[in-house]
Image: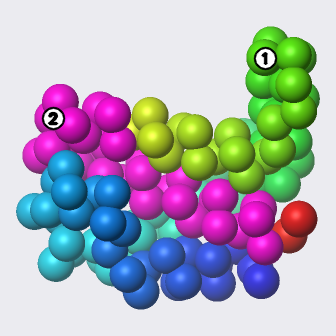
């Protein structure tokens, strides 16, 4: 699975955990995921942070050392997704949080497929 294909998969269904806390985004979910895909897959983003598989391996190594247990790259991305959902609970209308959640869901889906 490629990174864009992972985002296409995420766009197909509105996550139940988001539906519970921020249902207003359901109708716009495919467009939000498409916008996140463009941001994450852009050459500029990857020039700054490197390809997701490398960046998230670095993150997983740091978090594993901090937590003193193994954390996978996909777990890191899902944890960031959950952090964005926690923010949505406070501010369900905040677009940046739903956009970032879509981005992390796409990355996590991609990383899971690669592992």
Residue 5: where, in percent of width, then height?
Answer: 64, 84
Residue 89 part of the magenta-drawn span:
yes
Count of marks, rendered view: 2
Q: Which residue appears at 77% of the width and 83% of the height?
A: 1
Query: By what rule are the colours in the image chosen?
Result: rainbow
Q: Which residues are magenta?
A: 85-113
Q: Which label sits on residue 78?
A: none
Residue 15: where, in percent of width, then height?
Answer: 36, 68
Q: Which label sits on residue 67?
A: 1
Q: Is residue 104 left or right of residue 47?
A: left
Q: Which image quarter: residue 59?
A: top right
Q: Secondary structure at mark 2?
A: loop
Q: Is residue 27 left or right of residue 73?
A: left
Q: Which residue appears at 54% of the width and 83% of the height?
A: 9
Q: Which residue appears at 80% of the width and 13% of the height?
A: 66
Q: Is residue 22 left or right of residue 58?
A: left
- The crowd level at tag 1 (other Cα within 10 Å; few <14, some 14-19, many 20+) is few
Residue 58: where, in percent of width, then height?
Answer: 87, 34
Q: Which label sits on residue 91?
A: 2
């Amino acid at each position: 699975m490629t990174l864009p294909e992972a985002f296409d998969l995420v766009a197909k269904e509105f996550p139940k955990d988001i539906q519970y806390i921020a249902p207003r985004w359901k109708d716009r979910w495919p467009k939000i995921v498409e916008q996140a895909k463009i941001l994450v897959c852009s050459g500029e983003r990857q020039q700054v942070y490197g390809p997701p598989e490398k960046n998230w391996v670095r993150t997983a190594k740091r978090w594993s050392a901090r937590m003193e247990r193994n954390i996978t790259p996909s777990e890191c991305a899902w944890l960031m997704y959950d952090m964005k959902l926690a923010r949505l609970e406070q501010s369900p209308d905040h677009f940046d949080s739903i956009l970032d959640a879509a981005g992390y869901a796409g990355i996590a889906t991609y990383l899971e497929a690669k592992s």
